[in-house]
Each structure stands twice: as structure tokens, then as C-alpha cells.
Image: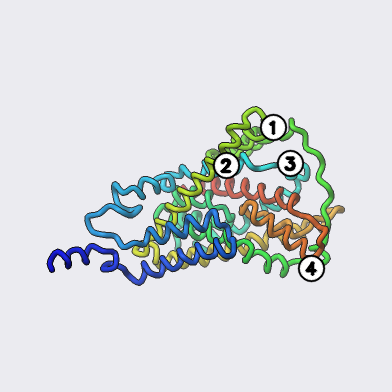
Amino acid sequence: MDILRQFLETTGYANLTLGNVVMMVIGIVFIALAITKHYEPLLLVPIGMGIVVGNIPPIEGMSLSVYDEGSVLRYIYFGVQAGIYPPLVFLGIGAMTDFSTMLSNPKLVLLGAAAQIGVFLTLLGALALGFSAQESGAIGIIGGADGPTAIFLAAKLAPHLLGAIAVAAYSYMALVPVIQPPIMKLLTTRAERRIRMPEPRHVSKRERVIFPVAAFLICALLAPGALVLTGMLFFGNLLKESCVTERLAQSARTAMIDIVTILLGFSVGASTQAQTFLQPQSLKIFALGAVAFAVATAAGVLFAKVMNLFLKTKINPLLGAAGVSAVPDSARVVQMIGLEEDPENHLLMHAMAPNVAGVLGSAVAAGVLWAVLT
């Protein structure tokens, strides 16, 4: 009986808490949303399963969780803590990104910049709720809707909030099709949503090859803190556009980014152990993240409407919603809303311009915040 009692005391059932059960349910909900609703399944399935795995109750004397010295999960999570995974994700994004639409219509870059207003307003909101300056900067970047950038900055400024910030950022990225449409429709008229964009001009190969080098120099000199993220992004794009390193570009945008996404998503989910994750500050971070995402979307749409006051050729204001960095989901949402009003109005190609500009904007914003708040 002593042996049986000792065995039962070492099982997860004996140490299971209500918090662990709540987190497991959240993880299962993430998995269900990914499978049934197709909400960013490449992110929500690894994160959801990671949440379930990470909330098996800790056993005294056994190194199992991401917080235990010597555990396998801790070694995997090291790539998150040290900021290794986000630049590798950016490398893959660069290798699959076409900047041609942005180069053909440079004024659309302003929409990506306008969406970063959400970052700085959320920073102020976090300060008002009692977070420190460094914590507020890490929380604010959620407004850019860029999971890798949020993880990178949180690892530098507020590593103790890394799990909550990462899960919040990726959750809102996955919920782009739910959050953005009501805001877009509320802030635009039917006539504005039916505006058709002119065909973009042809961008030469020389322009596409010169752009990643020139843009990197501009961004890195402006915000040296963004050097790693922007450097990997533009390096991946150069691999793609040079047409002489197709094997490397193919590996970066397929096998490598898939492997990193698995490790990143699973380890971030595993870090949400109830004993450390279910804290009042986590709920505040999720609330601020929702506000940040809504503000960023609204700022992009409203800025497009302001631009139309001065432009002869009007911009469809829906494109402003693509200024957040959720690539390519926010661009797809713009396409979906545009087609609802006019089945012949295809906005996806144009929406990719502010979308990729938003990626750059969030990376530069992260570099600025890191430099100022360190």
C-alpha cells in the first residue's frame, strides 16, 4: 500500500490544479479553432498542443517543464528566450515575399507605418495600468500583429512576460478574420469599399534586387536594434530575387520556416504553465493586445481616408487594415471584404503592399523601443 500511495502521489492526477485544467481547455480550444475554423492552423495547432503539454503538473525532483534546468523542453525553449527563432522566421518570410506591389505604389507604405500607431498607444495604455516602461514596450508591440517581433522584443525587455505576450500576439494574429472585418465596415462606406485600384506598374528585376540591400541600410541605420530582424528579412528576399540562389530560397521558405514554426509555437505554448501564466498581469496583457490590434486596424483605415483627401487617384480605405503585420491573413481579409461589395474588385495584390510594409514597420518600431527603453 505504501508503494501504491507513493505512485499515486507522483502522478499528474494528484497534483492537478484548476489552473492546469483551465489552461488545457484553452489549448484544446486553440486546436479546435484551427481544425474546424481554419484560424491560422500552422500556429494554433502547435501552440494549443504546447499549452496542453506544458500544463501537465510539475513533479518534484523531475525536470520536465520549460522552467526546469536540464529538461528537454527548456532546451527547445532556449530558442525563444535567446531570440533565435524570430530572425529565422523573418528569413523565411523574406524568401517568400514579393515587394513588387509596394515598389510600384510606394505611397501604400504609409499605410503600414500608420498601423504602428497601435503599438505606441498600447505602450501608453500599459504604462497607465502600472507596467514598467520596459514591460509596456514589450506589450505594445502586440499592436503590430507580428508574433516573431513580439517574441524578440519581449525576450529583450521583459522576459518574465514572454509567454503571455507571445500567446497574445499569436492568438490575435489567428483571429484576424474575426477582429478586423467589423472595424473595417464600421469605418468605411459602401462606396469607399467599392473603390478599384489601378493596375500596378511593372517592377524590373534590377529594382527588386537593389531594394533589399538599400532598404536594409535605411532601416538598420535608422533603428540599429532592428538589425537582426530586418537583416534576415531582406537577406531572405535577396535569395529569392537574385535568381541565382533558388535552392537556398526554397529551403528558407519551406523546410526551415516550417521547422522553426513547429519549435516556436510548441515551446511558446509549453511556457504557459498555469502556476506562472495565470496571473492578473496576463489578463491585462490580453486585454491590451485586443485594444492594440483594434487600434492598429482602425489607424490604417482612417489614415487611408485622410490620404484620399489629398490624392486625385483614390485609395480603397480597406487597404489600411492590411497595414498590420499579420502576413498574409490581413491582406486576405481585405480581399474578402472587397469582394463582398464588388465581386470583380480584387484587392489582394494591392493589400500585400501595406501588409509587407507593416512587417517592416513593426520590426523598426521594435528596434526603436529596444534602443530607447534599454
Residue 100, which numbered label? 3
- Label 1 belongs to which residue? 209
Q: How is the image coloured?
A: rainbow
Query: Could you tell me how far apart the alpha carbons at marks 2 and 3 are, in whole angstroms?
Result: 21 Å
Name the kind of residue labelled 3 in the image. Answer: Ser
Mark 4 and mark 1 residues within 8 Å of each other at the beta carbon? no
The kind of secondary structure element at disc 2 is: helix
Q: Choose mark 2 or mark 1, whichever is in front.
A: 2
Rendered location of residue 23, percent (x, y)? 41, 66
Between circles 4 and 3, the one closer to the viewer is: 3
| Residue type indicated by callout 2 | Thr
Please rate how many residues cluster around mark 4, counting C-alpha atoms within 10 Å: few if below 14, some from 14 to 19, many from 20: few
What residue lies at 47% left-to-right and 57% top-to-bottom? 47
**Element type where label 4 sits in the image:** loop
> As drawn, is 296 to the left or to the right of 343?
left
* Label ID, residue 189: 4
Disc 4 vs disc 2: which is toward the camera? 2
Q: Secondary structure at mark 3?
A: helix
Question: Residues at badges 4 and 3 in contact (C-beta under 8 Å)?
Answer: no
Q: Residues within 10 Å of mark 3 (few under 14, many from 20)?
A: many
Outermost residue to the left: 2
Q: Residue at x 75, y 50 (%)?
A: 350
Examine the image and state in which quarter residue 33 appears.
bottom right
Q: Which residue: 77% across, 65% down?
A: 340
